[in-house]
Amino acid sequence: MSLTEQRPSAVSAALAKDRLGIPSVVFFVISAAAPLMVVAGSVPTAYAVTSVIGVPFAFLLLGAIFALFAVGYVTMARHVVNAGAFYAYAAQGLGRTQGVATAWVAVLAYNALQLGLYGIIGSAVEPLLADWFGVSPAWWVIALVAWAVVGVLGLLRVDINSRILSVLLVSEIAVVLLFDIGDLFHAAPGGISFEGFTPGSLFVPGVGAALATVVAGFAGFESSVVFAEESKDRNRTVPIATYLGITIIAVLYAISAWAQTVPTGPGGIVKAATEQGPVLIFNQASANLGSTFSTIGSVLFVTSSIACMIAFHNTTARYIFALGRENVLPSVFGRTSARTAAPIAGSVLQTVLGLIVIVIYAISGADPVTKLFFTFGGFGGLGLLILLTVTSIAVIVFFTRNPSGETAWRTRIAPALSIVALCVIIALTLLNFDTVLGVAPDAAIRWILPSIFIVAIVFGVVWARVLKSIKPEVYANIGLGAQAVSGGAK
Amino acid sequence: MAEADLSSPSLADDLFFVMHDSVTGRARVHPRLASLGLAGAVLGELMLADRVTIDLDSGQDRTYATVHDATGDPLTQSVLDHVIAEPQHPVITWLLFFARTIYADITARMIAANLLNPPVRHLLKQQPAVPVDPNTAAWPLARLNLAVQRRQPPALRDCVLYGLFAATRGAQRALWEHDHAFVAATIAMLPPPLQRLIVQTEVAVGEAVISRR
């Protein structure tokens, strides 16, 4: 330790050295969105399940809507710092009860997104095992291995080292771009068509299902504000990282989704995606660039999926911990392991849920990619849309009550526009939820699943009311984040 | 506040002992959380010795030095000098700042005071520093265990020790029994500045759990 008389704030300077800059936050954001997993897994599945050609346009459209949403969101982040962003914003904007209800929706949505990933890992690993060792275990065997790895790493609180993460991420993006270029040089006989970028190709029956998948592909972008407290300059780092993250995700995914249609032509992509599923882009790469690149891509697909699982597992476990600590969830979820500093209860909860889901799908024999990965992704995507809408409303209300010198565009106009856009997308998703689930349009399940969110809201409201009457001092601190244990800001 | 000396083993030494196995020296608490606890303990030592206090009226938990007398110990003196040099920071900033280096500093101080043996390298693995005398090392934990068993709050300094140990989440693991209500009651007996120190240590530990790094 050195004495500090010579510099006015050596302490702040020393602490700032450990803080996150824009590139680190962008890396965290994009790695949660797992580029190769979305491009190889989600996009072909979206083509196959929904038969919508306009997936590339959907990425651009949602990117624009999320950027609009982010205007109010990052403005709010300057005024409210809390690791459980959505619920804290709802609590401070709309009221504590609404905050608790939002928290329960968030827990449900994040868990669904995490659990859905167990459906894709099998199809990522299986072709490699078949290729290298000539064995092809059932998808659930691979899923259980991944489940065990994620569960143990979660308890040991192993985060993928940010340097490894950035190497993986950069190689993933490079491979995706290389595959795209390969596709462009091997266009279908009809020539290169830009049909995927036309709005007309998106707004066809099934649009809502395609949108829900695309939303799931963006999942993770909202985590940028969680780093507000750890960032170098919270007024600059977080907004720039958020917009940059959304732009990179939207453009990269849109181009890649479109590139997949180039070798087959827009007319052939649905058939190709249905037949080949997640190996589609690797087959294309193998034909265009040779098998070496295809194998590199397949390996990165596996690492991408596992990194994404670990990231989502840890994010969700921490989210549950943050809520448990404030008693928004039962306080048992606020438990941590002293030895590993892991949020143990949240981690165990997710591991148990993961096992239940894998076992149910293994026994029922349902297709893991379309019925687990896609359905859970769509369900989680719907939850995310609800959260974003509630958050936008909270932003408007918060700044109406606490005028803070921010512009009307940031506090009113942009959030209002994003509410309208998000509500339209939610309506479209609900209209096509039968396609998300792959059931008949009159099946009851298409209404039962979305209504689980309503059940979560009801439970949240009831829990908040119980807290208010039994533990008013706990209720009073809801939405204050870390400071809740300290009795709040005085 | 009661006058207390800065003699050895100090509050930070005691916290180090309860956070580690008395025979093998193995850590019971993750180093990141342990460091935050030890930072709290060193500030606690200075607060018990009436050198430093927390400004409760500001609502920011600002920490400042009340007496500039020498502490007679290089580590606490260095911490005190930092606080004197920059009196504007809240206690949580100090916890994060001192946590960066305090683990190594305390270990070195305890080795110098002949409380710990210098750590040895076995093949590739760095072994933990082993206590010189297991009885000395086990004594603080035994005091806390007795206090909890009898439901009798211990002496002032041990109340701080107990509060900090619970704040690092180690008490739940290491004590024979863990009683939330008794922890709360024990902390409530402390002077308000020490209560704020423990609460802010708990906040910092919670943040460390959530942080992605």
Image (cartoon, coloured by chain):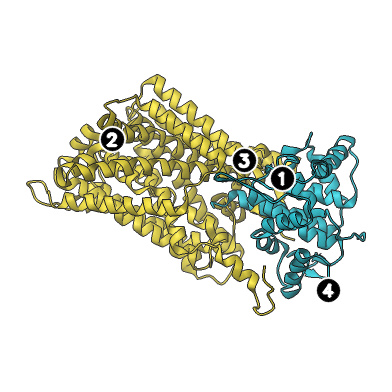
Q: Are marks 1 and 3 in contact (CB under 8 Å)?
A: no
Q: Are marks 1 and 4 in contact (CB under 8 Å)?
A: no
Kindly report the distance in space between the C-alpha atoms of the residues bearing marks 4 and 3.
53 Å
Amino acid found under the numbered disc labelled 4: His
Amino acid found under the numbered disc labelled 1: Val
Amino acid found under the numbered disc labelled 3: Val
Query: Quick one: which residue is furthest to the bottom in this view?
Result: A6
Q: Are marks 2 and 4 in contact (CB under 8 Å)?
A: no
Provide the letter of the chain coloured cyan.
B
Question: Marks 3 and 2: which is nearer the front?
Answer: 2
Q: Mark 2 falls on what kind of element?
A: helix
Kindly report the distance in space between the C-alpha atoms of the residues bearing marks 3 and 2.
36 Å
Q: Nearer the viewer, residue B179 or A234?
A: B179
Q: Is residue A427 left or right of residue B25?
A: left
Provide the letter of the chain coloured yellow.
A
Q: Is residue A81 left or right of residue A165?
A: right
Which disc, if any, is residue A245? Answer: none
The residue where tag 3 is placed is A461
Q: Are marks 3 and 2 in contact (CB under 8 Å)?
A: no
Kindly report the distance in space between the C-alpha atoms of the residues bearing marks 1 and 4.
35 Å
Query: How many neighbours does mark 2 have within 10 angstroms: few (below 14), some (14-19), or many (20 or more)?
Result: many
The residue where tag 4 is placed is B68
The residue where tag 2 is placed is A49
Amino acid found under the numbered disc labelled 2: Val
Question: Marks 2 and 1: which is nearer the front?
Answer: 1
Kindly report the distance in space between the C-alpha atoms of the residues bearing marks 2 and 4.
73 Å
Query: Quick one: which residue is furthest to the left in this view?
Result: A189
Query: How many neighbours does mark 1 have within 10 angstroms: few (below 14), some (14-19), or many (20 or more)?
Result: many
Question: Marks 1 and 4: which is nearer the front?
Answer: 1
